Amino acid sequence: MATATGVYHTSYEADLALRTTRAEWIRLALLFVAVIVAPFVLSPFWLTVANQIGIAIIGAVGLNILTGHTGLISLGTGAFLGVGAYTSAILVTRFDVPTLVAIIIAVAMTAAIGTFFGLPSLRLKGLYLAMATLAAQFILLFAFRNWEFVTGGLDAIVVPSPELFGWALQTDFAWYWVIFGTAALVVFGARNLFRTGLGRAFHAIRDQDIAAAVMGIDVGRYKLLSFAISSALVGLAGALTAHYRTIVTWERFTLDVSVLYLAMIIVGGLGSVAGSVYGATFMTVLPAAIQQFARNVRDTLPVLAREMPAIQLVVFGLVIVLFLLFEPRGLDRTWQRVKDFFRLWPFRY
Amino acid sequence: MTRQYRHNLNGSTLDKGAPQLEVDDVRLRFGGVTALADVSLTVHQGDIHAIIGPNGAGKTSLLNCISGLYRPQKGHIKLHEGEAAHVLTRARPSRIARWGVARSFQNIELFKHISVLDNLMLGRHVHMRHSVWQSFLFFGPARRREIAHRELVEEVIDFLEIQAVRNAHVGALPYGIQKRVEVGRALCLQPAVLLLDEPMAGMNTEEKEDMARFILDVNDLAGVTVVLIEHDMEVVMDISDVVSVLDFGRQITTGPPHEVKANPEVITAYLGEEQAS
């Protein structure tokens, strides 16, 4: 129950709800309307960007479960995306598996491989674990490039556009609904995860692993479970990329991608599901906006337009540094502050 | 008790006075240092059993052996449950917690970035079923479980008088309250034995009195067996039923407080040779 003096809950059900005040419900409704209307008003370029955002949201939520919520850093996200993409693409092109089934198998496959490469986390923490997952990144990338009779090596796999319930998924417009439908489910599921005992156990391991063990949490098992859930979502993002882009090449799954995803969750906010969404959106829109800007100034400022790829990299690095310096808890915290400002207005605190 | 509680916080099924925890001939070494030299003691159900001794006597090492963080080289530690007994010396900490050993730490080891409520709910972890699918769905079994366990947690919150900080982030709370939350987290496990490692360290008199009252409540009213490490002798002599004294890993004596207080060896351990003579 929300009143002028604060929010008061009169049942445990109400206390567990994600939305309590009317303002929160209105904001959610506005977001919902915006997501529904967007594909009808966006230009083809921005519609493609929107789809990339949707896929990035799924991957970033996945990585954040592992790194932000369980405190296990992973540099292997790029490769795990690749496992999802290659598995699904190979199943569809070589074995004629229906796309939906192929995606489900790809998710399970990525979860299994992610769990396997999570085994070092039983012994390692922090930077040492980062090195171990970096190894996963390089081993898997090596496999994509050199295990030719399975992955096709350096050649790209071309995936036919899938059909879903007799509905051909060829346009960005059609894909938009699939991607954002999936992303919404993933975000809602992740939010739910962290209001139950399972997500709490992940937080406990992140904050104090010895105390977690003494409180009866099987730390090793839960770390691997976190790897499994996280990789499953990353694999889902990878599989969707494969079918959406209809082409799978190893170049999309390099270390750069792992770092990009880490940047997303740092900029968005570590340990926050909403933060993953903000970060994924921001880090996908930023390069697209720069690209668009370069196109606009092609005639007036050709020098700037020509150097744009370099500028894009600089801006990318700069954004991460600035966030680490001025908003280490990410866009999620910024959004909290904005809400607080209006809630407390006209007072400062 | 201020009100009738529905949940029994004591996880032990043994009768009061029955042997609950048996430490048998435990030896723990770190290289050349002998932290525990053949220590044997028995904690009885329903007692407050204090372990005292000068710094470096091996008190925390003993607690760490009981909760599975250290593996002693020799000896056994047994936890009785009904007719059976669990051997703790080779078990993992998470398994030992499941059997009903809960503890607090000397330097507060709470989960800092989550709320008091979540910390206490983590005390319920071993009693809850966890399923990935149900967690993702939330509505249905997962939510029912959360609410069922929340009821016991709320009783512990009431018991320890921390209602006002329920939703606060633990890291932002004052030291004394954090210590109390840590006891609460252990209590939510419905322990058979509650191990408290210096619950009053660094507190002022008033906070100490509060903590002593809570420990007595936990023991008297809820019936939980408490193993207590504490340096404040007044508190120890006042509230404990049995006192064990360690010095350089060696057990000097075990007995009721007034006997231990008069034991010349204990005085020597604390004050040194000359003053004792």
Image (spheres, rainbow, N blue to C red):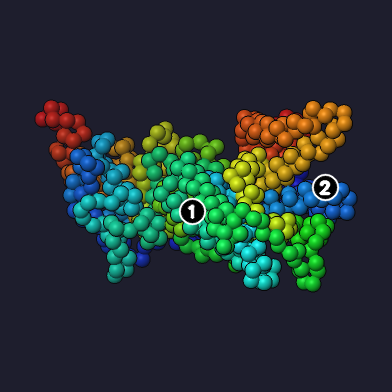
Give the label on residue A45, or none: 2
Q: Quadrant of residue B252?
A: top left
Q: Residue at x 28, y 51 (%)?
A: B71
- Which element carries disc 2, helix, strand or loop? helix
Q: Secondary structure at mark 1?
A: helix
- The x and y percentages for residue A238 are 65, 56
Q: Which residue is mark 1?
A: A118
Marked residue nearer the N-terminal end (1 or 2): 2
The residue shown at (63%, 45%) is: A257
Mark 1 burial class by Cα count in 10 Å: few <14, some 14-19, many 20+: many
- Identified at 42% across, 42% down, the residue is B211
Q: Amino acid at mark 2?
A: Phe
Front one among A93 and B217: A93
Where is residue B66? Give x, y as percent.
31, 52
Q: Quadrant of the C terminus of chain B?
A: top left
Disc assigned to residue A78? none
Q: Position of residue A305 (x, y in %)?
A: 80, 32
Q: Could you tell me which chain the residue with mark 1 belongs to? A: A
Q: Name above or below for residue B152 compared with residue B251.
A: below
Q: Residues within 10 Å of mark 2 (few under 14, many from 20)?
A: few
